[in-house]
Amino acid sequence: MNASIAPTVLLVLRRLATALLTVLLASLFVFFAVQALPGDVAQQLLGQDATPDAVAALRETLGLDQNVWLRYGNWLLGSATGDFGISLVSGEPVGPDLLVAFRNSMLIAVPAMVVGVALSLTLGVIAGVRRGRPSDHTISLVSLIVMSVPEFMVATILVLLFAIAIPVFPAVVLRGDSATVAELLPAVWLPAIVLTLAMAAYIVRTARSSTIDVMASEFVTTAELKGLTTRQVVWRHAVPSALLPTLNVVALNVAWLLGGVVVVENVFNYPGMGKLMLESVFNRDLPTIQAIAVVSALVYVVCNLAADLIALALDPRLRTRRKARS
Amino acid sequence: MTRSTTDATGAALNAGPGGLPGRIRGVATSLTSSLSGSAALTIGLGLIAVHVVLAVLAPWIAGHDPVATDSTVALTGSTWTHWLGTDQYGRDILSRTLNGGRYALLVTFLATTIAVGIGTVLGCITAYADNWFDEVVMRIVDALLAVPSILALLVVVTVFDSGLWVIVLAVTVVYAPAVTRVVRGAARTIITQDYVTAARARGEKPLSIVFREILPNVMDVVLVEYAMRASWIVLLISTLSFLGFGANPPTPDWGLMVQENRTALTVAPLGALAPIVALATLVIGLNLSADGLSKSLGIDRAQKGAVS
């Protein structure tokens, strides 16, 4: 019993350590890249009219005169406890604002991810099972087109259709950053649909190709010879087998999904993390940029960790074989 | 969210068997990932070739200066002098779209070549090294992949200003790590082959083994990576311009054109649609080429994600 569990535990521990190291390294890169951004933090906080003495004093209070490694250490410790510093634009702590923006983004990203995975699994399995038939061609063609049209155009077209031609949804969020969840709900639909489409177009291909692989495998032939109906074969074999690679692709694309979030939040003026990111890069709000980058890196690493652990739990082969690094 | 699911699924299913007129079905059959490798490659390369020819000949066939404004003809529809009409400043949309292709193709070519080049060499070397160097590089690659690409791009562009080479540099930073990881995976399977062992036994130098034994044998993976990355890089660069961090006005750039003209979408739809059609056909061409290549070369492309 112990002999079979120990390697798995080691594998999980090793994976956890790697994940932690990845987040640390990412935070290091982010910190030093952001330090390179032009502009002096103290000067920016006080405005152009500030006396050199005042700027020097503030630099000292903020610890900007300290060694850069020391500042990195302090910032990292602060971030770990949720203290991301003071925003250069609002003068308020970054943490609470970021939390609201993050919650708002999750409001569109999580449904988009869940629906996107469900939709693409359905379509991918249909296309894979009906390989070479008209439905397969249609699904493949539509996903190719959706994949090739940038999100900002899909968003613009949806605004035109469902906010202007047939006003079902609001085109943009007017209340801005102070909007509550209830106020945001009507505005969530269009951005979420754009993200869903963008996600699904990529995942359909994965689901389709793994379905084709499974349907050609010997155990499916055996299952068919046993007298299982196509429906049973699909539910017992094709769907579970398509699920694993799909989860993997989703996890790997979390960072890319954030890019989509930036675009749709920009088009719909939706007060989430993507919009906050664009604004803080535009305003050189260094503490906010750093915080967003670290939080995104954390989300990415956690999603990949989760995907790996789920794969480990679902696929016993991964537990016995020495798992490839990377 | 349930509403949008059923709608989208329903629409896609309705368009399925028998739901399409024969003519459209014919087009559908000839343009999908269910297509045979050589056919996809032919169509894909054909589309790319059309774009390259149009980009090269743009100054001669455009007929107008892409940045010349003329307030007397602002937002005209399609006319004999302006085939695709004009934008709000009276600039010729056809000329801007054609010239936008020059910029998009040049940046994409440079950025993809450099990113894939660096990733390939690094991937082969790390796979062969398989020691502390490999471990260090892969940890750095993982960390770089964890930072959202759009943020990395925005920061690089803000630090160095948005010139052509800065965009190329930014895209390299974003995509070289991903290519490194994929090529390393392919190279690791090559290293176990007998001819690599033989080269080692002959006493060949490590660099010679990397470049003469491993590199030529991962070229199939690299080719597919190239086409696939290029399609994302085109989209990424235009997204950057759309967000206002890429090409500066009045540069004729596709993403920028959509940003400028989308408010006038109901008045002069071609201003935003022309660059989008150009962009989408180029991306479809690149995607089909990647599909065709991976099918002909026996590499399963669909198992990979957008950024993996």
Image (spheres, coloured by chain):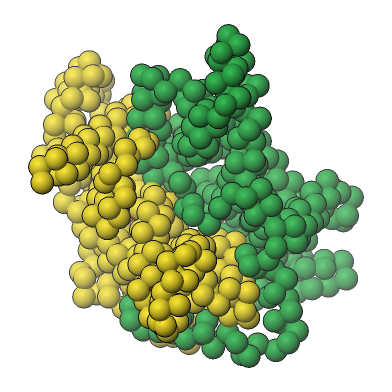
Chain colours: A yellow, B green
Q: Is residue B177 left or right of residue B106?
A: left
Q: Residue at x 60, y 87 (%)?
A: B17
**Which corner quadrant of the image does residue B166 belong to?**
top right
Q: Using the image, determine if residue A135 lies above or below residue A82.
A: below
The spot of residue B52 in percent (x, y) is: 79, 49
Q: Using the image, determine if residue B223 lies above or below residue A115.
A: above
Q: Residue at x 19, y 39 (%)?
A: A7
The spot of residue B237 in percent (x, y) is: 57, 47
Q: Nearer the viewer, residue B60 or A81?
A: A81
Q: Residue at x 52, y 81 (%)?
A: B12
The spot of residue A243 in percent (x, y) is: 37, 64
Q: Using the image, determine if residue B69 lies above or below residue B308.
A: below
In the rendered image, which quarter contains the N terminus of chain B?
Answer: bottom left
Q: Is residue B42 left or right of residue A138?
A: right
Q: Using the image, determine if residue A310 lies above or below residue A175.
A: above
Q: Residue at x 24, y 74 (%)?
A: A183
Residue A197 visible = no
